[in-house]
Image (spheres, rainbow, N blue to C red):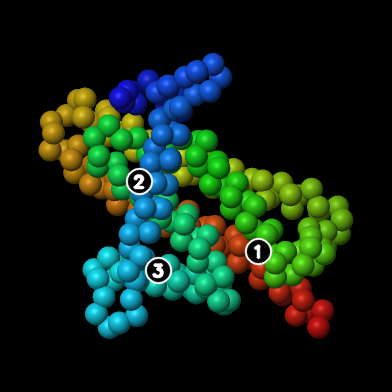
């Protein structure tokens, strides 16, 4: 399997198979690989889930992860965290696992591809109005875009688009630069120092997953809270 080289910025440039215009790139392969791990892993952990006091280690780990994500959501939004748990939890697990698997030789994190981070950011971009409409209704949600006057509508739209772009570029830049730094260190320094940097990179990868999920939750909660505040003032 071809490995991402120094002169290749993105795993999108690593083409593993091509037939006409149909291409299977490293980004696509590893994205589906991560999805497969999450799906199969979720099934294996939850198939024998129990409400007993003594549970399996995997169920205990799952409960810790879910509880942690719920607590983080609760700190940002006063609403029931279960309303956002599936979406925010999936974002965190996908980005986190993508970054953690960098310890596997030959693996390239799909989050070091702008197409992947852009797709994740677009999911957030779509989720923000969907959650807002679910809570406020279509009229109540889009009314905010015309506040304080209709002249501000394009500025609100530009703000949403800019925020989405920043979300995608931030994750892509951090992960792509990490891959490049590790590759350079492996080429010019002894083995010991790159191993330390690689371990530090795993921590950075988890932090990036946390930041991405938290920012997504902040965007969703701030939109819902803005509409709630408007409703409270008008009451």
Q: Callout 3: 10 Å neighbours few (<14), some, many (20+)? A: some
- Against 230, is 155 above or below? above
Label 2's element?
helix
Q: Residue at x 50, y 18 (%)?
A: 19
Label 1's element?
helix
Q: Determine which residue is flagged by label 1.
A: 131
Q: Callout 1: 10 Å neighbours few (<14), some, many (20+)? A: some
Q: Determine which residue is flagged by label 2.
A: 99
Quick one: label 3 or label 2, which is nearer the N terminus? Answer: 3
Name the quadrant containing residue 227: bottom right
Q: What is the spatial separation of the Cα atoms under label 3 and label 2, in whole angstroms? A: 19 Å
Q: Percent x, y for residue 161?
A: 66, 46
Residue 155 appears in view: yes
Query: Quick one: quadrant of the C terminus?
Result: bottom right
Q: What is the spatial separation of the Cα atoms under label 1 and label 2, in whole angstroms? A: 28 Å
Q: Report the side of 205 relative to 85 (left or right).
A: left
In front of the other: 117 or 146:
117
Residue 208 appears in view: no
- Against 19, is 62 above or below? below
- Against 114, is 170 above or below? below
Q: Determine which residue is flagged by label 3.
A: 66
- Against 208, is 18 above or below? above
Residue extending farthest to the front is: 47
Q: Callout 2: 10 Å neighbours few (<14), some, many (20+)? A: many
Name the quadrant containing residue 219: bottom right
């Amino acid at each position: 399997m071809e490995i991402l080289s120094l002169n290749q910025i993105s795993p999108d440039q690593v083409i593993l198979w091509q037939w006409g215009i149909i291409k299977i790139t490293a980004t696509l392969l590893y994205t589906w690989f991560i999805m497969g791990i999450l799906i199969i892993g979720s099934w294996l952990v939850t198939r024998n889930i129990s409400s007993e006091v003594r549970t399996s280690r995997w169920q205990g780990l799952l409960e810790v992860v879910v509880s942690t994500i719920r607590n983080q959501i609760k700190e940002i939004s006063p609403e029931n965290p279960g309303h956002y748990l599936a979406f925010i939890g999936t974002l965190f697990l996908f980005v986190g696992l993508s970054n953690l698997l960098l310890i596997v030789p030959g693996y390239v994190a799909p989050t070091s591809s702008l197409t992947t981070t852009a797709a994740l950011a677009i999911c957030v971009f779509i989720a923000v109005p969907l959650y807002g409409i679910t809570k406020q209704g279509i009229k109540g949600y889009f009314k905010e875009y015309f506040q304080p006057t209709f002249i501000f509508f394009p500025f609100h739209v530009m703000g949403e688009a800019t925020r989405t772009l920043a979300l995608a570029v931030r994750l892509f830049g951090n992960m792509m630069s990490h891959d490049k730094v590790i590759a350079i260190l492996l080429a010019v320094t002894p083995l010991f120092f790159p191993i330390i940097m690689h371990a530090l990179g795993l921590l950075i990868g988890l932090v990036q997953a946390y930041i991405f999920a938290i920012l997504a939750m902040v965007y969703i909660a701030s939109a819902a809270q803005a509409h709630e505040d408007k409703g409270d003032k008008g009451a």
